[in-house]
Amino acid sequence: EKALEAGERSLAIARELDLREQMAYTANDLCHVYNRTGQYGKSHEILEETRSVWRELGNLPMLADNLATASYVHAFCGEYDAAAEYSQEALRIGQSISNAWGCSYSQAMVGPMYFDRGNPDLAMETMKSSLSYAQEAGFVVALVYTRSNLGMVLAELGDTEQGIAAVQEAIQIARNGRLQLLRYPLSQLAEVQMLAGNPDAAAAAIAEMKSHPGPFHMVQPPVVTLAECRLALLQGDTTESGRLLEQRLADLRGYGMKAYIPETLYLLAQARREAG
């Protein structure tokens, strides 16, 4: 709340004084606060407003950052065409100015979207490209999140051994100084272990996940809940999984995070069916 209040106050001052570049920098940071508080409508508006400023100023690094942020917001909201368009433009700009961090960021969160659309080859290519650039730039968020997503896709395609290895590598990176990122790869490890037929290992990952601090990134809450509920269903706890899923479904609908609603509905239907 303090970050939101301070950011909006700073933005209002910049607008009042017609400091367009300062307004754009402030808005760039503020949109992340909006994202983490589920205010995606405001995030969309502010990203679109500042995008025109970066284009006018010819500030390519900030334009690419804006487009990359917009791509993952659209992806989480289920607006896949827009997400792909912004991701590709951000990547082109990043490559044109040799910005490895920007190239990684532009692709970091859209791999699962391509997989959901039935294009596993493009999903794998996108995630591996993001990781290559992330390694070059030292972009830890991508090294953790994107590697976790890669592991999940590998497991979904049947290579659970490589999937587990990829997620475990992401977990180790998070443990080395970025513990606030740890819940996400642990949730993905639980998912991969369930796909591999290892419910005890999945339960251990969920238990460790619960022992760490709350979500750092807006994608953590739905992914963490889905892993937790899938394990509860596997263990026959339909009451708790149903309760968590109903709560998360209401949150997702309120936030507009459409990308996670189908899987949440599927698991909720399964919980209700098994509960009788």
Image (spheres, rainbow, N blue to C red):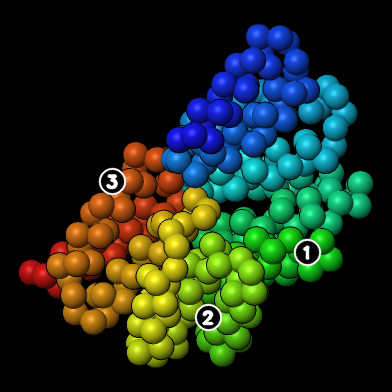
Q: Position of residue 28 (x, y in %)?
A: 67, 34
> Is residue 5 depicted above or below 212 in this figure?
above
Q: Amino acid at mark 1?
A: Gly
Choose between 64 and 183: the one closer to the eye.
183
> Is residue 29 depicted above or below 224 in this figure?
above
Asked whether the beta carbons under mark 2 and mark 3 sit within 8 Å of each other, the answer is no
Q: Position of residue 206 (x, y in %)?
A: 38, 76
Tell me if mark 1 has few (under 14), some (14-19) or many (20+) residues whose alpha carbon lies within 10 angstroms of its own: some
Q: Report the side of 103 relative to 78 (left or right).
A: right
Q: Position of residue 170 (x, y in %)?
A: 61, 75
Foreground tag (2 vs 3)? 3
Q: Amino acid at mark 3?
A: Ala
Disc number at residue 138?
A: 1
As helix, strand or loop, the secondary structure at mark 1 comes to loop
- Residue at the farthest left position: 276
Q: Report the side of 135 relative to 174 (left or right).
A: right
Count of marks placed on residues: 3
Q: Amino acid at mark 2?
A: Ala
Foreground tag (1 vs 3)? 1
Q: Report the side of 120 relative to 4 (left or right).
A: right
Q: For the residues marked 2 and 3, what is the alpha-carbon distance in whole angstroms?
A: 29 Å
Asked whether the beta carbons under mark 1 and mark 3 sit within 8 Å of each other, the answer is no
Work out which quarter of the rendered image holds the N terminus and state it.
Answer: top left
Foreground tag (2 vs 1)? 1
Q: For the residues marked 1 and 3, what is the alpha-carbon distance in whole angstroms?
A: 37 Å
Residue at horizontal 74%, vertical 23%? 22
> Is residue 192 depicted above or below 84 in this figure?
below
Mark 2 lies on residue? 155
Mark 3 lies on residue? 250
Decide which of tag 2 and tag 3 comes sooner along the chain.
2
